[in-house]
Image (cartoon, grey):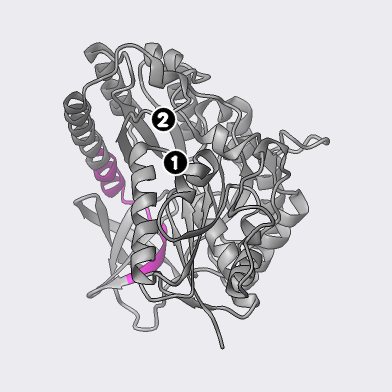
Amino acid sequence: MIKKVGLYTLGCKVAQYETEAVAEEFERRGFLLSDFSEVCDVYVINTCTVTAEGDRKCRQIIRRASRKNPDGFIIVMGCYSQRSPDEVEKLPGVSAVIGTGGKMSAVDIAERLLSGKAPFESGKTLVTDVDCEPFEPMSVTRGERTRVYVKIEDGCECRCTYCAIPSARGRVRSKPRAEVISEVEALAERGICEIVLTGIETGSYGVDFEEKYTLCDLLTELDGRGVVTRIRLGSLAPELVGERFAHAVAPLKSLAPHFHISVQSGSDYTLRRMKRRYTAKAALENIQRLRRLIPGAQFTTDLMVGFPGESEEDFLETLEFVKRAEFIDCHVFAYSKRKNTPAAEFEGQIPEDVKRKRSERLINIAEAVRDKVLSDIVKKGDVMSCIVESRKGVYWYGHTASFAACLVKEKDKSLASGDMVLVRPTHHNDGIIYGEII
């Protein structure tokens, strides 16, 4: 009898990639992939612990699976279970707990549970020391035609004072160069138009290699092979996209002119307390350099409000930074206390209502800046390439190379998801560019 497995991911693109790799392994081993909302024999939940809200959602999803099928087996893995395994183990219905290492063992664990055996020799929790783990081999062979994520790096060694991820993900480990290239080429052969190279600290790719081989080297090699239409990068730290990086990537034809720069704050005082490795001025200079060297480049970012000790003046500096950087999109979130991080013990914790109001103000500024950027794009009128992703009535929805959301009227009934079209922008509304296919 075929067993049904439902998988659920909380958190980042890295976690989404990992869940897809695990899902493919379940399918290879004879399981039927089912929707998580269905009654399944096995549930696998890949967790997140970036914020306290993330932890709460993890617990909520675990309880939901337990209610859906009290007789099903629940395997919990990922960042939350790495940092709080005892807490996860006590939740109702949990059958096995692993951390951020050994995710590909989820299928073995499921088979043991289904055969009436214990998941491990001792207890139901096996969380390893990720600092001692190598890069876990995994790959994906499919995805939407429009965009597929490829994990090339794991771990982070920045030790920012607010962040729980280094303790959940461990040191930097990079996927071997040959494995990255092989995976990207295989996906391109299956018709994938866009590959997103991602990691916990993507810009640190290769720092753990004995031979000198960096993210720039990888991008240059992939570009030279010419196998994929568009390569996009995951989140990058501002200090890692300096002058050398900019000059190395500017000539690359396949690299999308879009960079997600995780700035966090526009206040130097706040950045120092966060233990970030750059100043607001340096971050802005790196953004402006990339913009000069790569015509049409656009930038997105993450911004935190309400970090302990953040004054009104500090917050206003962040607002000014956003205006000067001209981001096409900003992910705004409030500081959240994480246990065993230095910032959780800092004086000057900001009240929740102040965080909420600052978030609203920053979002409003970010939207105004976005609208200005989109207006400039429309006014310039340059033809843009757009990979269409889904139909919305008489329109196709997709993203340009610079990651502007785009709606274009269908002219050709034969268009399909994943096709690339050339678009001339006509106007914008509510954060979306409208255009004509030419």
Q: Amino acid at mark 1?
A: Thr
Question: In percent of the image, x 26 and y 13: which residue is there?
Answer: 311
Which quarter of the picture shows residue 184? Answer: bottom right
Q: Residues within 10 Å of mark 2 (few under 14, many from 20)?
A: some
Query: How far apart, in angstroms, are the residues tagged by discs 2 and 1?
Result: 9 Å
178 in the magenta segment: no
Q: Earlier in the sequence, mark 2 or mark 1?
A: 1
Percent x, y for residue 380?
31, 46
- Residue 373 forms part of the magenta stretch: yes
Which of the numbered marks, if any, corresponds to residue 209? none
Q: Which mark is residue 49?
A: 1
The residue shown at (16%, 28%) is 357
Does the rendering let one see residue 296?
yes
Residues at circles 2 and 1 in contact by the CB criterion of under 8 Å: yes
Q: Is residue 270 above or below residue 150?
A: above
Residue 118 sits above or below residue 394 on the image: above
User: 134 or 42, which lies in front?
Assistant: 42
Q: Is residue 245 above or below residue 90?
A: above
Label number found at residue 338: 2
Whole-percent x and y of residue 62?
Answer: 40, 57
User: Where is 266 relative to 5, above or below?
Assistant: above
Secondary structure, mark 1, is loop
The spot of residue 379 in percent (x, y) is 26, 46
The image quadrant of residue 139 is bottom right
Compare residues 200 and 132 and report the one nearer the observer.
132
Residue 183 falls in which quadrant of the image?
A: bottom right
x 61%, y 32%: residue: 245
- Give the number of marks: 2
Of residues 392 and 108, the one drawn nearer to the viewer in this rendering: 108
Q: Which residues are magenta?
A: 372-390
| Lateral position of residue 425 relative to residue 255, left or right | left
Residue flagged by tag 2: what amino acid is it? Answer: Arg
